[in-house]
Amino acid sequence: MNGLTKPKIMEVTQLLNYSITLLALIAASLAWIAKLRWSKEYKEAKEAQIDLLKEKLAFYENMTSPEIFDFYKKQKEELEGIIKNSNKKIDELSKNSTEPIEKYNQLKDQYIILKEQAQNLQEINMILEERQEKIQTQAEEIMKQNIILKEKIQKKLNI
């Protein structure tokens, strides 16, 4: 039996079982730690959003009619300025009409490449899923064989 006695085999099997259990406990602990950290970050982000909304609400609640009128007048002027700048940019781009067409063609080519890559990734993903299923099946077979071997070893040890 390759220098392994029955008690040594049992010790090795027991050690493997303990190691696997310990690794599973460590993995579960790490998952819980990550979950707690993420939930804390999510809570903090939501609280920051709530605080911001409370500040905005307080700002609007304290405004009088003339202040509201001035506020919206100022916003209207800012938006008109943005529209004016946008119109200038549109005029500049329309003067150089070949530039947008070239940019469009470049983006179109990039889109085609990215679409092909996405299809390739989907195919690779399907292959990986198939392999994962095969590996899972093989792992289940190995586990069944392991159980059978353990039972045989235990029977032989009991004899």
Image (cartoon, rainbow, N blue to C red):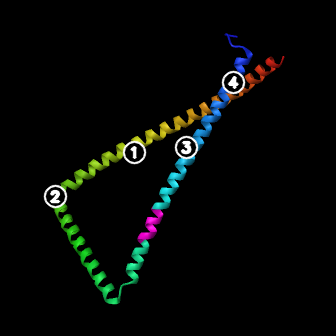
The answer for how far apart the CA atoms under marks 4 and 3 are is: 26 Å
The answer for how far apart the CA atoms under marks 1 and 4 are is: 51 Å
Mark 4 touches mark 2? (CB < 8 Å): no
Q: Which mark is residue 96?
A: 2
* Amino acid under disc 1: Lys
Mark 4 touches mark 3? (CB < 8 Å): no
* Amino acid under disc 3: Leu
- Closer to us: mark 1 or mark 4? 4
Q: Residues within 10 Å of mark 3 (few under 14, many from 20)?
A: few
Residue interval drawn in magenta: 45-52
Which residue is identified by label 1? 115
The answer for how far apart the CA atoms under marks 2 and 1 are is: 29 Å
Q: Which mark is residue 30?
A: 3
- Closer to us: mark 2 or mark 3? 3
x and y, in percent, of residue 88 in the image: 18, 67
x and y, in percent, of residue 67 in the image: 31, 86
Whichever of callouts 4 and 3 sits on the residue coming sooner in the sequence is: 4
**Toward the viewer: 107 or 58?**
58
The answer to whether residue 104 is left or right of residue 97 is right
The answer for how far apart the CA atoms under marks 1 and 3 are is: 37 Å
Whichever of callouts 1 and 3 sits on the residue coming sooner in the sequence is: 3
What's the magenta bit mostly, secondary-structure-wise? helix
The answer for how far apart the CA atoms under marks 4 and 2 are is: 76 Å
The answer to whether residue 142 is left or right of residue 99 is right
Which residue is identified by label 4? 13
Mark 2 touches mark 3? (CB < 8 Å): no
Asked if residue 95 is positioned above or below residue 76 in the image, the reply reads above
Tell me the quarter of the picture where residue 5 sits.
top right
x and y, in percent, of residue 83 in the image: 24, 71
Asked if residue 57 is positioned above or below residue 88 in the image, the reply reads below
Q: Quadrant of the N terminus?
A: top right
